[in-house]
Image (spheres, helix red, strand yellow):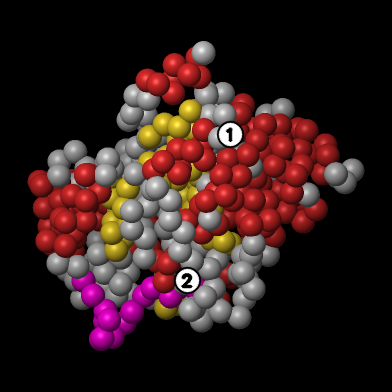
Amino acid sequence: MSSTVTPILRRVVDGERLGFDEGVTLMREAGLLELGHAANAVSRRLHPEPYRTYNIDRNINYSNVCAAICDFCAFYRKVDDTDAYVLEREVIHEKIQETLDLGGDQILLQGGLHPDLPFSWYEDLLRDIKERFPRLNIHGFSPPEIHFFHKKFRMSLRDVLQRLQEAGLGSLPGGGGEILADRVRKEITKGKVLSDDWINVHRVWHELGGRSTATMMFGHIETPEERVEHLERVRSLQDETGGLTAFISWTFQPEHTEMAHVPPAGAHEYLRVQAISRLYLDNVSNIQSSWVTQGPKIGQIGLLFGANDMGSLMIEENVVSSAGTVHYQTIDQIRRSISELGYVPRQRNVFYQYIDEPAEELSAAAG
């Protein structure tokens, strides 16, 4: 370790908060193994329990139509494209039932910024789902979608979120975060929410008593300073509201996108940034490993680089797979990845509450 990095890592392992400049130093200078060692130490301090978690859910993309233009996205379509779609209600019901049959307890419901659907369509969808599946948690509508509703329907953010909450929305995902630096957002997207408004969607949701997650997609045109700016904004929001349950980062997948010329960031860079995220976000309890983009083995190693959660079984995923990245695991494989590291696998919900009782593994761990 460099003489600059060593004292920074020692202090953060001891519980001191990283400053912005220290975060940039780690991004620029710290080596992979020392970052992993420090992040694992912090993760164990925050999560001394013998468990590491996973969940079972499904990404249901109710539509692929989007009024925004994102150079990094291979999924979206214009409203008049031949392969544009809006799912029929019966199809959504079938996908939910399949998820419940596999032991899931929630869906991730997201689409694009559809220019034609009325607000009542979204409210009716939520009410219909909750009527048919009352115990299901709907983790739905990313901040860009919420902000789009706010602008398109000329409603306040509070009214948008309150009405969706009353219709059955249970929690808010952190999608569309990319990098929370407006230089980056303006260069790679058009017609999409900027950083302050992305943050404010979460802020208002938290004021209504809701919980949400935060994300970061990195490895494209951002600088190390802009990666830390993103982490700083997430940490500041959590200082203010305490409403974030978890942070999830992943690398940009360039294939089939307008940014296909950008060399993909590899597993080394993914693990570095995840480790730094654990060190910087001292007020966000949970860090989720991204095996969906990195593959099962790197996803497992992520549990040694600051993550305490393996993420979802991911019964269905359409956005990342549109960019050519397709990794699959079974529940047994996810559980094995956790147990091979000496932890007891536990199923949790979006609020990081355990929803299983693994008596055999608990007995073995106690023995």
Question: x, y percentage for residue 25?
Answer: 77, 51
Q: Is residue 166 left or right of residue 254?
A: left
Question: x, y percentage for residue 76?
Answer: 36, 75
Give the labeled residue for mark 2.
324
Q: Which residues are magenta?
A: 72-86
Residue drawn where x is 44% and y is 20% of the image: 362
Question: x, y percentage for residue 40?
Answer: 65, 35
Residue 196 colored in magenta in the image: no
Residue drawn where x is 45% and y is 44% of the image: 333
Q: In terms of sequence position, does the residue under pointer 1 or pointer 2 come before the other?
A: 2
- Give the CA distance from mark 1 to mark 2: 29 Å
Question: Looking at the picture, does residue 279 appear above or below residue 183?
Answer: above
Question: x, y percentage for residue 18?
Answer: 69, 40
Q: Is residue 336 left or right of residue 220?
A: left
Amino acid carrying label 2: it is Gly
Check the image and name the residue furthest to the top: 367
For residue 182, which quarter of the picture?
A: bottom right
Give the labeled residue for mark 1.
341
